[in-house]
Image: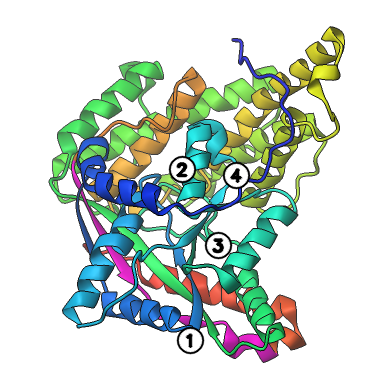
Amino acid sequence: MTTNIQVQPPLEFIPPNFNPLVFQSCEFVLPLWLRSRTNIAEIKAENLDTLVDLYQQFQSNKIRFLMAFRHPSVDDPYPLMYLLTKLLPKAAKQQGISLQKPTIAHFIYDRGIPLWAGSFIGWLYSQLGGTPIHRGKLDRAGLRSIRQLFVDGQFPMMASPEGATNGHNEIVSPIEPGIAQMGFWCVEDLLAAKRSEEVFLVPIGIQYHYINPPWASLEKLLTQLEIDSGLSEKSAVDVPTDGVKFSSEREAILYKRLYRLGFHILGLMEGFYTKFYHKTLLEIPPSSVSNPSELLFLKLQALLDTALKVAEESFNIPAKGNVIDRCRRLEQAGWDWIYREDIKNLEALSPLEKGLADRIAEEASLRMWHMRLVESFVAVTGKYVYEKPSVERFAETTLLLWDMLTRIKGGNPFKRPKLGKQRVEMAIGNSLSVSDRWDTYKASRRKAVNDLTQDLQIALEKMIVKNS
């Protein structure tokens, strides 16, 4: 299969350039976009009074703050924009508070998004006040922009501390320490400028719920995945269901099908890496685990580790750190081979040199494919449906499998099937003061950053509603 990946010049920094006219156009189009291009039918938010107060203080030059939001879905930017441009002004008006318009945020986004979403997205994000960051290297230009905006930007900041979507409504991925560090930099810069504003991190929870349980659509999608993966009735796997609390026979059947499909796909992928990449995966006897979900989880983790090692060996990168760290390093290694900073002028290359550079770029893209598979399954525990066989958890897990099969087939994993209309529920959490931790930061930067990161992780996890 030809990837058509060619060598490119180095990625340029896309400076934020807020354009009120572009913002107003997006604000006008947003309701229509939500109805026609997403599953989102309803958006609610709790504790809006907290956000109103934060914006009022920000606009009075009393505080600086960053909204750290959960990132379960690629659709998250739409309800977040709706929150700031629709729900927030409405709540302020109800309180008799007049906020300066527009109520929006400078948001931090992954520099890789415009690479797969198109250059127009890079332009649009810039016009909406967004600022990019490279996730896998020391991005000095990106960090300078973030630091400047946090201290002097027209709007508050917004970012996902998870770093990427994880596909799970009820699991928070391990969050990255960069958000906490940005908070401390802001305090440092304000003190250097002899300014008195306090600095806060504000956790924001986001969850999606199907308005009508899409069991029929889910069964149809699962049937298609079984066909695409070559799963036959003869591929039966014994699926113990002890300890699983099903509310209907339908759930029990669907659980067995999902588990069976997962094991089938794992077997195919294990064979793929064993036969063609000469890898020996860890053998896990079923008798060594307490339940089938634990076995599925351990086998999945062994597979993901193997996939990462295949990519790491090809880039000559050591396998160290957690899965997210390894994915970030691999992504940056691939970009270094495609977006060549060591080639000053592509036009000056001879046809032979250009051909070799294109070959390297093509190989980098193919090697990054292994990392992309892993990236989709970072938050998968194997126990997610086992612990609570809700329609949301069934749907999330089935859609992750769809992502994997679609990526393997060479399709676009960002065009997910629509299973049914959803309600988005957001919540504004209690602010975490960064300024109050400044003395701890001066004594031990690592401890202060780690403590604040852990507190933010706990705050986001506490905001997850698991009984709705």
In the rendered view, tell whether residue 395 sits above or below residue 245.
above
Badge 4 is on which residue? Answer: 111
Query: Is residue 390 shown left or right of residue 189?
Result: left
Secondary structure of residue under mark 3:
loop
- Mark nearest the camera among 2 and 4 is 2
Q: Position of residue 142 (x, y in %)?
A: 66, 54
Point 85% across, 18% down: residue: 348
Gap between marks 1 and 2 measured at Cα? 30 Å
Q: Is residue 292 magenta?
A: no
- Is 432 colored magenta in this rendering? yes
In the image, which disc is placed on residue 175? Answer: 3
Q: Are marks 1 and 2 in contact (CB under 8 Å)?
A: no
The residue that disc 1 covers is 62
Q: Secondary structure at mark 4?
A: loop
Specify which label sits upstream in the sequence, 3 or 2.
2
Q: Which badge, 4 or 1, comes first in the chain's sequence?
A: 1
Identify residue type, mark 3. Answer: Ile
